[in-house]
Image: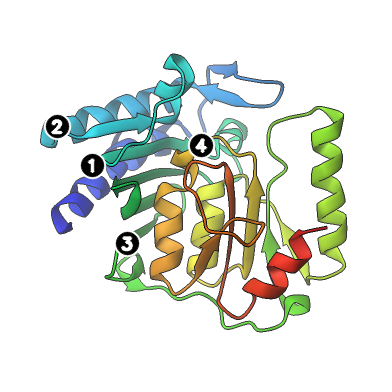
Amino acid sequence: MEDFLAAAVEAAKIAGEVAIIRFGFHKTKNVEHKGVVDLVTETDKKCEEVIFDYLRSKYPDHKFIGEETTAACGVTELTDEPTWIVDPLDGTTNFVHGQFPFVCVSIGFTIGRIPTVGVIYNPIMDELFTAIRGKGSFLNGNPTKVSTQTELVKSLLATEAGTKRDKSTLDAITNRINNLLFKVRSLRMSGSCALNLCGVACGRLDLFYEVGFGGPWDVAAGALIVSEAGGLVFDPSGKEFDITSQRVAASNSFLKDAFTEALQY
């Protein structure tokens, strides 16, 4: 597992810092639309290509799932085989705007559909989150732990509005947020599901949930990083987390029950 982690870190740094994201952050971007507000850039595609090429050169027998590959070729099934799950640039809208520094490379590695290695690298803020199942979670080599907050009303919550803009979806999102704002201290939206999970893992955030995100590439690394930091990752209904469900919630162990109850409205 240490070898897999080292390979993922190297791939993330090549895409994030040495070659692409850091260099392009303040540059003019060539932007395409996957939806009304869902963006993709040439950087997303180039990063995925670089990461896959590097990891395939080391592990040619492994499976690969990437956000941009899946967008181009359709849904890729997650199997029990060793699989790399990659979001080459999470926070694309932030990247396009070029000023809000919450962008990252997310690389997860699953065996038997279970996240086993996780790497999330923000090259703009130079923060590297890493985890191996059973061996803890780290930020730039230092151990991370979730918060010890026990009261929902004193908690900092993160979520995202997603990319769908039909009225029924937006009404459901805003109604839930309106309800939650009565029950927590404040709300944040960073624009990156992966970095929101990292925020819970290092105690910057107490709570996070999102429904309807892109796919397993958004959570494959972050879910492990939270768990290895002592946190809980679960479905917003309170049921067991499913990496393929496009539904995720995370908290420390003290807040889960109250958070789950608050999410049901």
- Percent of width and height locating residue 24: 44, 31
Q: Are marks 1 and 3 in contact (CB under 8 Å)?
A: no
| Residue occupying image coordinates x 14% and y 32% | 61
Q: Amino acid at mark 3?
A: Ala
Q: Disc 4 marks which residue?
A: 215
Residue pointed to by mark 2: 61
Give the residue pinned by disc 3. Answer: 131
Q: Earlier in the sequence, mark 1 or mark 3?
A: 1
* Chain-order first, disc 4 or disc 2: 2
The residues tagged by marks 4 and 2 sit, at their Cα atoms, a distance apart of 23 Å
Query: Residue at coordinates 69% horizontally, 26% vertically from top-left?
Result: 37
* Disc 1 and disc 2 in contact, CB within 8 angstroms: yes
Write down the residue under mark 1. Answer: 82
**Mark 1 or mark 2: which comes first in sequence?**
2
Q: Earlier in the sequence, mark 3 or mark 4?
A: 3
Rounded to the nearest whole Å, what is the CA distance between mark 4 and mark 1?
Answer: 18 Å
Q: Secondary structure at mark 1?
A: loop
In three-dimensional space, the C-alpha distance between marks 2 and 3, rounded to whole angstroms, equals: 23 Å
Residue 100 in view (yes/no): yes
The answer to whether residue 121 is above or below residue 238 is above
Q: Position of residue 40 (x, y in %)?
A: 54, 23
Q: Amino acid at mark 1?
A: Pro
